[in-house]
Image: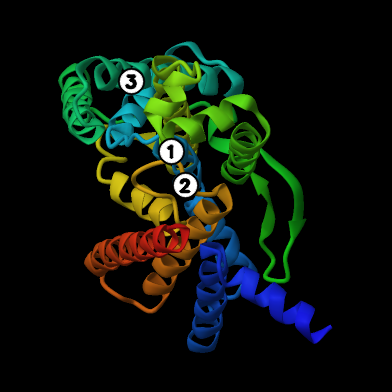
Amino acid sequence: MLNFVRRSVTALMKHHEFYLSMMIVLMMMALTMTSEDFFTLGNLFDMSISSAILGIMACGLFVVLIAGGIDISFPATAAIAQYVMASYVLNLGGNFMVAFAIATVVGILLGMINAILVYKLKVPAIIITISTLNLFFGLLIYTSNGEWLYGFPDWFMDGIELFTFTGHDGYDYGLSLPILTLIVMVFVTSFLMNKTRLGRQIYAVGGNADAASRIGINLFGIHLFVYGYMGALAGIASVVQTQITQSVAPNSLMGFELTVLAAVVLGGTSMTGGKGTLLGVILGVVLLAIVKNGLTILGVPSYWHTVVTGFIIVCSISMTAINEKKQAVQGA
């Protein structure tokens, strides 16, 4: 029995997710002892809602990184999808199905523009997507004149909430639209990457694109799908963000790419493609959400949040690179 436990612990320690889980537990314990406001039902629900957008976009970026690409333009993609969706809802009405459908289609189209440029021009994806980030955002500001949109109908402002209950603090809680959307997107992405042939092909392309091409995998098709998927999830996240804030500002999501990239890389996804798990990404999202929430509760100035996020990215990339080198040495 002792040997079995020892082998199990040794096996767990080989996984990046184990260390992330330990960090999350230790950080939650520290914040619980430091502040009585952290481990409360209200704060945990608020943290879940505020991190839903991060989690949804992280699922999309995870798929792109696994395929060996990268997308920096998704905040601008989300902003355009958000503005188009909001304009339609404010002028013509509709429901959440319509809102999600419009934002998703716009996101897919913009994502596919990235895919075509990356594949056809053979330019590094980070260069292309930084360019389209500025291009998309500039066009949005030009066409919208930077105007805010607000005054949404009651059905949009009220949102959706299931399994509601009243907590000991007297407030009502339940599975709101942001949390429900995050759960659905995590399930869809998990099914895609772990249970489908397409998911295996995405991993294969990220691992070795030349070898994947030789066995008949359509590289252009994979590019169209992964960047389109990122665009779709950016559009979906934009609807969630609009419902949370009850307004649309053209620049509200700009700069969010750093935080999303931090969550995915922190989860152990390789920047070179082919390696990573969705579980690691979700743990990365949880850890960043706890860090941000903890800094806020402790009264740390907001500019330090960006410093901490950047530090986490550096540490995560370093840890991932070290692990890959160790695995390469062991494999040799």
Q: For mark 1, does the 10 Å Cα neighbourhood hold few (<14), some (14 to 19), or many (20 or more) residues? A: some
**What colour scheme does the image use?**
rainbow
Outermost residue toward the top? 92
Q: First in sequence, mark 2 or 1: give its number.
A: 1
Residue 71 on image: x %, y %: 31, 34
The C terminus appears in which quarter of the rendering? bottom left
Circle 1 is placed at which residue position? 207
Outermost residue toward the front? 332
Circle 2 is placed at which residue position? 275
Residue at point 57% right, 76% down?
Answer: 25
User: Comparing marks 2 and 1, which lies closer to the viewer?
Assistant: 1
Tell me the element at label 2: loop
Amino acid type at circle 1 is Gly
Circle 3 is placed at which residue position? 115
Q: First in sequence, mark 2 or 3: give its number.
A: 3
Tell me the element at label 1: helix
Q: For mark 2, does the 10 Å Cα neighbourhood hold few (<14), some (14 to 19), or many (20 or more) residues? A: some
- In front of the other: 107 or 20: 20
Amino acid type at circle 3 is Ala
